[in-house]
Amino acid sequence: MRLRFDSLRWLGAVCLCIGALSAVRSVPAQTFIDEVRVRMIEPASGKVRPLEEAILKVEIYGTLRSKDGSEQKGLLPLDAAYLVFADKNSGWVSKAYQCPDFNQRDYIRERTGGWRDILGTVQNFTLKSCYLYTAPEKPGRYRLQASKDGMAGEVTLNVEAGAPSTRTAELYTFPDEPRSTDPYFPLVEHYAPFIAQETWFTVTADSLARFDYDGDFHGDNNWDNLGKGSSQAYVYYAVMETATHWFLHYNFFHPRDYSDVCALGTCHENDNEGLILAVRKDGTTYGKLEAMESLAHNLLFSYVSDDRIGERAQNLDGALVLYEGSHPMIFIEAGGHGVAGAADGKLSLYDSVVQQWLPGSTGITYVYKGKAERPMHTGAEKVGYALLPIYEHWWLRAIDGSGRAERMFAEYYTYAPLGDRPLTPVASIPAAFLGVAKAANKARPFWGWFDDRTLKQGILAQGQWALDPAYSFTRNLRFPDELPVSLDYTFNPYLGIGTVADARKSESNPVKGNTPAPAETAPGWGSPASPPTSGSSPAPSLEGWGQPAKAPEPKAPEGWGEPPATAKPQQVPEGWGTPEKPKQKMPDGW
């Protein structure tokens, strides 16, 4: 079974309850399938526009035989059907999720009374029998088959250009970012990751975004403004430097952390996960990438490119895989948006070798272009993203009080690092983004992040992993003597070391007005973009870098930002894309 990020989000009371109830269920009822039906439940017209979405529901009818021999006929509480298109290029189908019209009373189940009935209710509550279908670009009639235990049903999907649109018009478009004069920017561009972003049943919630995607810095309206705000792709960054390393932060913001069943804080307004790269300064312009650590739901995952680096507080979760020689390939899960290496066999659903999604998965891939493009659909490939500095967009608001007044931040705390390490330049910093929908204040800027393992073991304090990466990497990983790591910063403005020249708070400056429909392939909708250029002035040099660094000039491959030429496999046999029993790599001593 594949360990999924969902496993990390379903630990707790629900797991214990289901486990305890399972113990009292001795002899399960038998099910006999008579018929499998597939139908489109949204849109109600039964027609879908090219590159737009529809909801498909799989219903399995048959007989349920109880242990006493009694039988009931009707809709069986079964899911995990196998979906496959009759022809290629027929569109995309997401992994399963609980239907929006789900009602447990629609299903037959064994009724024996007491705890067994309660267990049946809990099991029905987790049924996932709906799928998000995204139509291909070409209108037509497409056949899709669903099968379960040898029985199959089929539906014909009508894709018509004149079908009513189901999309909400976006109200904002952000202009291109001016060429950054940050002396570290060429380095950040050079290592900007290749992002395989899995999608589920709310594609806009899985699309990369900026915090002010809806035209303001309020955190408590981001959930409700989904669909109205811009879907242009952005990644946030920060840089810290020591005598031996550059530490590069990449943060991935989403307006919603969502699921089909929201319980125990699994859904909340705003979401910010990320990664840190450790790049050794070896005398070359861009140095050598040595290690990456990523965050998923308060757990860290570690990847190295040098096998001399070993485990310490953290386990090693795999190797670093690079796209075009310098861009780490990463996977971001749908819904909860935990980050892992794309080659992580336990967590990633993206094949980094052939650069395709695994069967039963859908997603968007993003590459750095210096231009914030919109994904045209759930299977868009190599959509361009732009980089935004955390210091100007978030940190200055965090330390001058304006972030509180703007309803951006919440839960201020005093950073208290372990190991007699440097403090932040102000006594109180926000641990969370302000959020009210579903669960309050669950998303964190990087200085509020923590890893459950090292926090509980007293190795790293809250915020220390990302605020002090030179220290945290040496506590999480074991570097040999021939790979020394300096703990003294020459630049870390988040700890009051060094300054950012001409820094000023960014302002939200989108252009208001409805955006064109993606089917028109308007500029910025995942269309090819020219590589970033250096502008009128060269990138400043950094002491110790040698010669001034030139901006990278990636060659735009054929099909950047365009729909893929062939549809990926849609669904795989039972067990793929369905909920698994919660499990987690537990830290030593827990």
Image: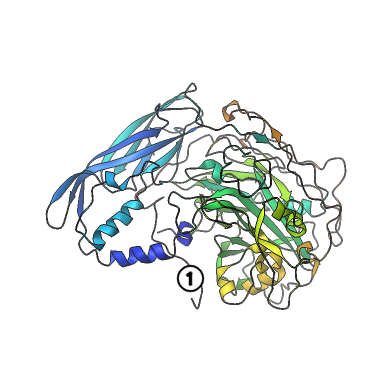
What residue is rendered at 39% in x and 62% in y?
14
Q: Residues within 10 Å of mark 1 (few under 14, many from 20)?
A: few
Task: Determine the image quadrant of residue 452.
Answer: bottom right
Q: How many marks?
A: 1
Determine the residue located farthest toward the front in the rendered image. 405
Specify the color scheme: rainbow
Question: Which image quadrant for residue 450?
Answer: bottom right
- Residue at the spot of label 1: 586
**SS state under label 1:** loop
In the orientation shown, which residue stands out farthest toward the top? 162
Q: Nearer the viewer, residue 248 or 398?
A: 398
Residue 157 in the figure: left or right of residue 221: left
120 to the left or right of 489? left
Q: Position of residue 420 (x, y in %)?
A: 73, 78
**Residue drawn at the location 32% of the way across and 55% of the way down:** 123
Residue 312 on image: x %, y %: 60, 75
Mark 1 belongs to which amino acid?
A: Met
User: Where does residue 385 sit, x and y in percent of width and height?
Assistant: 67, 43
Viewer-proximal residue among 221 and 537: 221
If the image is split into quadrants, where does the N terminus sit?
A: bottom left
